[in-house]
Amino acid sequence: MTRYILGRLISVIPTLIGVTFVIFMFQRLIPGDPAVAMLGEHATQENVERIREQFGLNRPVFLDREALAQGDFKGFFDTQYLRYMGRLAVLDLGNSIHRRIPVAETLALRFPATVELAILAMLIATTIGVPVGIISAARRGSFIDGATMIGSLVGVSMPIFWLGLMLIMLFGVTLKWLPVGGRLSTGIEVTEITHLLLIDSLITGNMPAFKDAFQHIIMPAIALATIPMAIIARMTRSSMLDVLQEDYIRTAHAKGLSERIVLYRHALKNAFLPVITIIGLQLGALLAGAVLTETIFAWPGIGKWVYDAILGRDYPIVQGGTLIIALIFVFFSIIVDLSYALLDPRIHYE
Amino acid sequence: MAEATPDQIKVVDFAVREHRSLWGDAWRRLISNRTAQLGGVIVLFMVLSTVLAHFFWEYDPKSDLDYSLKLKAPTLVPNEDVPSVHIMGTDKLGRDIFRRVVHGGWNSIRVGFVAVSISLLIGGLLGLLAGFFESVPISSLERYLFKVLVGVVLGLIPAWIANQYSMVVLFAGVGLLSAYADLHWEEKSWRAWLIILLGTLSGGLPALITSPYTALFTAFLGFLIGIMLSRRLGGKLLSDATMRGMDIILAFPSYLLAIAIVAFLGPGLEKGMIAIGIVGIPVFARLVRSAVMSVIQKEYVLAANAVGEGHGRIMFRHILPNILSPIIVQSTMALAGAILSAAALGFLGLGAIPPEPEWGSMLGDSYRYLTSGAWWAVIFPGVAIMLIVLGFNLLGDGLRDALDPKLKI
């Protein structure tokens, strides 16, 4: 098992190197000079050169052919990509070109916002999706089942940015119950410990801040939860339906066990594996940041951050942000695989 | 007693029924499936209306502008404020939203179709090859092709460093020779050394024109490529390399990848199609590969192989028709996904170039006016997106039930 985990973790490295390589390839291909993007069209040549020098943008992207031709092997490898990889080896993500502050610093502020939103969305999706799936499987063909199936299809078909807009219109503009964007109202302060505002305000016993943070997060969380919820409900239902046909379920019924015990102890346990997969993969996807939801609700997460950086040609952010997102995503698929072995004693990893 | 002539014998049809093909059966199940019926009707209605509008209802987005009608609520009868009828109201430039929704469908749906075609063709082909050669040994002709391909792809690296692209031809030659060596000089121990030597020379000699230092480095690369080519590379490498590439694309967050591709290609509908298409490639590659691997050990594939049918024929005549069901279902679902992604790109301003109508960009244009109460400019394009996506999802669900009666999802 340990060997399997190690093997999987090591196999992540080539994938991530591939990801960085692709990012740099894009960086070379995408038109537009980050130095010009930062200084504006009318910047003097010297200033542009200075910025390019400072961020190493004057170096070739992958390998310096001219340096090699002159016998300068050190210069040959002294390129943007290899410099970046060298810094990455000591966990340095570099500085933002536009704001001149370390990428890691902004990431530490931005990432908790995404984590908080993703986890709350996933909690909503799971606490509603799983029971709904179980009920509709247990009452197959009933009205509830039909409503669940149609509802879940509508859920996956919903453009979430549109749903977000509808929520804003209803609760933010018409009813004025909830704020329309951001993480906190101005004037409300939270002592930040974990940077997860809901948890921080609870720890410090700051109830007004908790209420305010909750009012801010609930709409984006619901919008973000819609699609995972629909997928989880469908998955739970179909997985339960498969299991409910098994012989041991009939045996359990024949023994006279109550419906509840059969459903929860015999069926659900065995039906949960594919559901766990979906939950894990969806959580990984949500943690990767939700560009659209974050844009609509002005949520300061990493999706919007990297998106803005792509458009603004702030390459260090694009590189660092994408790498972290890819890392999370790959990491979650490994966790999902490992959770199989924990949940199902029949599965062993060599 | 007279003998009965053959034409007097009547077959009692207790076991014989009218011939029904597999696909005929599937079709029958499909059209009797409620979900598929509903999905089909929605899709047909939406596609037909936008296609008809595109060809028979003229609309010039460039000249469509009337500030006097800016952001008017939907009206069913003309009044003094709004002299014309706008059943879905007007947008910030006074354009009729109904008209733009109907015409916008042409763009939105087209993006979906083209994008899915791209992912299906490229991803499907990669998956088919990867799945097939994962378990079937490559033939001698394929060995030549494959080794030349490996030689060319790897040869590009030293060729680029030395800026001598003739090197690629040399490495292709080394690849060719190594394939020949694999097939004909199997017992000869020096064949590996020969290939490695030739690889080193191909890397080193042409680079001498550039500089001796470059030659030193590229000769080393050539040496490595030689080692690679001297081995009996098989289908496993092809499959592994393909799937690794797919893993890398999958590791990227899909929206960000699409945005990066659009940033690279520039905005516009066609670029959006390509971006969404590329993002969808790994999904199809994985699906098709696993589908191929599930049928590759079936008797009919083994039999086709045993009677010596060509690999291409086996792939396209025997395997492909038998794995079509999951591909069709996935394509329908992917259409829904692609239309959603296209709308998302449009919403972010990376889709159709204004004033071209497109559902996502219509939403992106109008959502700022939501706070001033112009709900109609946001509701209708969104409903259109949701309807068509729902239609394709329903159809996909119905198709899955119809094509694979064993599956009950």
Image (cartoon, rainbow, N blue to C red):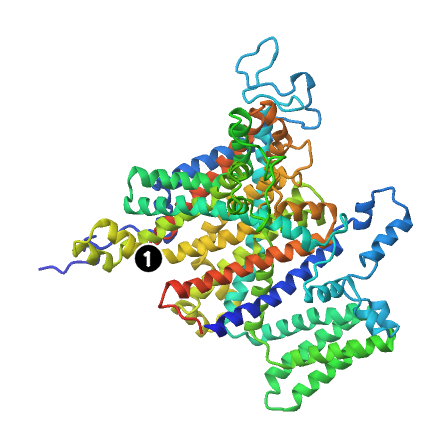
Left or right: residue B15 compared with residue B115: left
Return the residue found at the far front: A205
| Residue at (60, 61) in percent of width and height | B248
Report the quarter where the N terminus of chain A lies.
bottom left
Return the residue found at the far top: B80
Residue receiving disc 1: A269
**Whole-percent x, y for residue A64 in the image:** 82, 66
Quarter of the view holding residue B6? bottom left
Asked which secondary structure carries label 1, the reply is helix
| Residue at (49, 55) in percent of width and height | A281
**Whole-percent x, y for residue B14 in the image:** 19, 53
Number of other residues with Cα within 10 Å of mark 1, as a class: few under 14, some 14 to 19, many 20 or more: some
**Whole-percent x, y for residue A33 in the image:** 80, 50
Left or right: residue A227 compared with residue A31: left
**Whole-percent x, y for residue B293 in the image:** 46, 66
In the depicted view, which residue is nearer to us: B109 or A165?
A165
Tell me which amino acid carries mark 1.
Lys
